[in-house]
Image: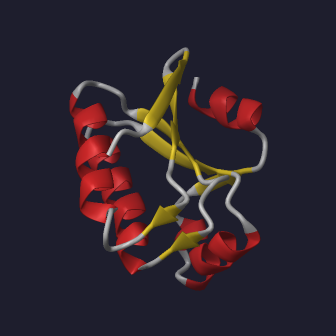
Amino acid sequence: MNLQCQSHGSADLITIPPQLVMANAPEARRAIKHLVKSGRIHLILDLKSVDFIDSSGLSVLVSTLKAVQEKNGEVVLLNPSDEVRSLIELTRLHQVFDIFEDRDAAIEKLS
């Protein structure tokens, strides 16, 4: 999976594909893990394009957070749709992740 990644100072904005599901979750996890191994540990996961996420996709978010925290980094979520936000809240992940609607505010948080 070729994730789009844009650097903004010390923060990296990663655009997540429209569906983060069992079929592509392992590939997404590997791609993000590669970024973390290369030293990118201040990540903004842009969920704007995500229209469907399942438990495997949520697992990618959590495993990303764990990998980054092991290196004293941070992960924030950006622009989840109402449906994705509802699932994040249902699973109480909103208590674990900072969620932003404003890209500049997310970048400022991690800079």
Q: Position of residue 76 (x, y in %)?
A: 56, 47
Residue 101 left/right relative to 85: right
**104 or 108: nearer the viewer:** 104
Count of numbered marks:
0
Q: Position of residue 87 (x, y in %)?
A: 60, 79
Residue at 28% across, 43% down? 31
Residue at 60% across, 85% down? 90
Q: Residue furthest bottom?
A: 90
In the rendered image, the vertical position of residue 109 relative to residue 87, given as above or below: above
Residue at 59% across, 60% down? 50
Residue at 33% across, 62% down? 24
Q: Residue furthest top?
A: 9
Q: Position of residue 48 (x, y in %)?
A: 67, 52
In the rendered image, the vertical position of residue 24 relative to residue 27, given as above or below: below
**86 or 70: nearer the viewer:** 86
Q: Position of residue 19 (x, y in %)?
A: 50, 65
Residue 50 left/right relative to 4: right
In which quadrant of the rendered view does residue 97 lie? bottom right
In the rendered image, the vertical position of residue 89 relative to residue 96, given as above or below: below
**Visual colour scheme:** secondary structure
- Please state, as top left, top right, bottom left or bottom right, where the C terminus lies in the image: top right
